[in-house]
Image: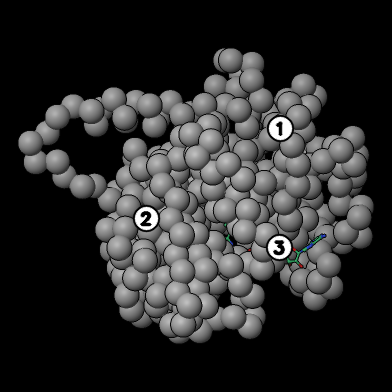
Amino acid sequence: MNIFAYLEQYDYEQLVFCQDKASGLKAIIAIHDTTLGPALGGCRMWTYAREDDAILDALRLARGMTYKAAVAGLNLGGGKTVVMGNAKTDKNEALFRSLGRYIQSLGGRYITAEDVGTDVHDMDLIHMETDYVTGISQAYGSSGNPSPVTAFGVFRGMQATVKAAFGTDDLAGKRVAIQGLGNVGMHVARLVKEAGGELIVADINDDSVRSAVNELNAKAVDVKDIFEVDCDIFAPCALGAVINDSTIDRLRCQVIAGSANNQLAEDKHGDLLHQRGVAYAPDYVINAGGLMNVADELEGYNAERAHNKVDGIYQIIENVFEMSRKENIPSYRAADRLAEQRIDQMRRVRSNYLFHEKSLHR
Ligand code: NAD
């Protein structure tokens, strides 16, 4: 991989390699853009087949965080850590404390959090060496489980998307097909039910499906049939890349609004949804509640303040659809453009010389 060419192409600031033989640490910290503030992004632990795969994963995910934070209105940049290793067998105290010291050495340019393969215990170990970590135990002042907050944001984003498609954000009588009843999906299902929506659900876990059927009067369908059920709203809350060549023609919804990351297999699928008049809530906008919640920890966590920020996802999604309409561009492009505009504007604002430059973490 030609690393500098890639960094230049997408305007990355920094790529850090961290190695500690004693603990087995092999980690990569990618910092994409810190125009808005310190780069915040989770720490992923994964067994990568090749070093290049790990580097590319860190880089891509870091850039995604820049856009996510920017469109969410947070004063944060984008970064990500990947730890090369098996999350089940290769973890030890020294590894995370060593990583914590590398993060500390960046002086606050990067703040880490949980991600795939890491948990609150790992964050507590990192916290022994640095304050630049979120998602630590609640006893240390953390925000706790982000999933209910993410679900609330998805619900508000769903309402705004429904408004863009139907002219009203009322979910009463709307048929909502939810794929995945995990930490986020089940909460979304409850909120939809409370708002008077009708639920159609699918999950590979039969217990979750049974709960939704018994508790929420949901209709259960087979996991392979969820794409083609007759519904108003499809809410992907399980896996990425679910809008792809083999599913897009089967969809019968007018709205797509769910929590899953990277829902579009390729950009062309977002273009097709736009051409077909399906209102797609860009994934990284609608699922930003979890990020908003951990970001609030940086100011001393306040659940009510975090809740209010997440409530604002409704307005952000409205802005996305307004731009999509005005410019006649797909919603996923409109979201990117809003993020880029904000970064450009703030870059200009911050170029104004201040004698006492204050380092803002908000
Ligand atoms: P989770 O693991 O708790 O839930 C995922 C659910 O999907 C599980 O119940 C699983 O059985 C089900 N599932 C897996 N494969 C399936 C399939 N083929 N068909 C139907 N169901 C299937 O995860 P989560 O925390 O609820 O997150 C859900 C999605 O939202 C993920 O893509 C995640 O990256 C994204 N997300 C989550 C958060 C958060 O705060 N938890 C924040 C942002 C984005």
Write down the residue under mark 3. Answer: 49
- The percent coordinates of residue 168 (x first, y second) are 63, 32
User: Label 2's element?
Assistant: strand
- The percent coordinates of residue 18 (x first, y second) are 44, 65
Depth order, front residue of 293/178: 293
Task: Please state which amino acid type lies under the numbered disc 2.
Answer: Tyr
User: Label 3's element?
Assistant: loop
Depth order, front residue of 45/157: 45
Is residue 298 shown left or right of residue 339? left
Q: Earlier in the sequence, mark 1 or mark 3?
A: 3
For residue 267, the mark is: 1
Residue 192 shows in the view: no
Write down the residue under mark 2. Answer: 110
Mark 3, residues whose alpha carbon is within 10 Å: few (<14), some, or many (≥20)? few
Q: Which of marks 1 and 3 is in front?
A: 3
Q: Distance between the residues labelled 3 and 2?
A: 26 Å
Looking at the rendering, which quadrant does residue 166 occupy? top right
Residue at horizontal 45%, vertical 43%? 32
User: Label 1's element?
Assistant: helix
- The percent coordinates of residue 100 (x first, y second) are 38, 71
Residue 283 shows in the view: yes
Depth order, front residue of 338/314: 338
